[in-house]
Image (cartoon, helix red, strand yellow):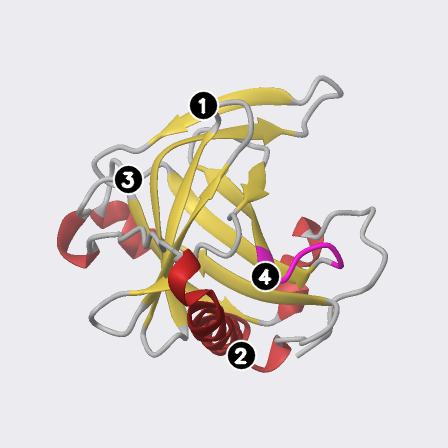
Amino acid sequence: MPAKAGDEGEDFVRIQSIAACAMAAAVALCGTAAQAADGDNANSEANAKRVFAENYAAKGKSYACFVRRYDAAHLAKHRLQKVTAMKLLVSAELLPEDNALNYSFHIATNMRDRKTELDSGGSCGHPSITEDSAGKLQFGCGVDCDGGGVAIQMVNDDKSVHVEIERIAMWSNANDDGERISFSSGADDRLFRLDRAKLEECSALIPKDEDEEPPTQ
């Protein structure tokens, strides 16, 4: 992902962790590793609470909804911006075979030049949420089959997100073929600020095959 996008852009950092266990001090190191794992789990839960706020569920699925509808004044000022509205659903769950939260995203946009909504989604990894030096949370999400993705950063005291797009594959449900559209960022279609909203606003983005209904705000 690019380092910056306009005045609002910030570096997106990918954290790498390295673990080692020497034979000569196996017991001591394994004890330290266990403490580190406990710390990682605590940090993961704390980060999840920031992303999902009151909708964080220690068991089951957690959801967060962020929305922005651009008014005529904004679009008149940013004439190169194609996006007129955007919704983002972030979800996470703790899978039985895993000990880490698995994040995913679903995004939908309306465009100036299209009558139908475009949507996309994918995995945000395991868990790839990291905390930068300014105390903001940021994570990256990708679309399968080389479909690009988005970078997401929590801002405004976690009440909003910055969504940065370089390239992402999206689909139109206007026909049965599911037309694939390649959306690439432009001068005014690179960084978007979306605000936290009620989950009902993102209900259409929740996969139909999910077994449980999301909590309501």
Residue pictured at 56% horizontal, 21% vertical: 180
- Residue 10 in percent (x, y) is at 20, 56
Q: Which residue is mark 4?
A: 100
Crowdedness of circle 2 by 10 Å Cα count: few (<14), some, many (20+)? some
Q: Is residue 49 above or below residue 192?
A: below
Image quarter in which the N terminus is found: top left
Question: Mark 3 vs mark 2: which is more N-terminal?
Answer: 3
Q: Is residue 130 left or right of residue 109?
A: left
Tell me the CA gap for discs 4 and 1: 32 Å
Q: Is residue 82 above or below residue 205?
A: above
The label on residue 53 is: 2
Question: Mark 1 vs mark 3: which is more N-terminal?
Answer: 3
Instruction: Please provide the residue range marked out in magenta.
Output: 96-102
Question: Mark 4 vs mark 1: which is more N-terminal?
Answer: 4
The label on residue 182 is: 1
Q: Is residue 30 above or below residue 149?
A: below
- Residue 48 in percent (x, y) is at 52, 71
| Outermost residue toward the left in this view | 7
Residue pictured at 19% horizontal, 47% vertical: 5
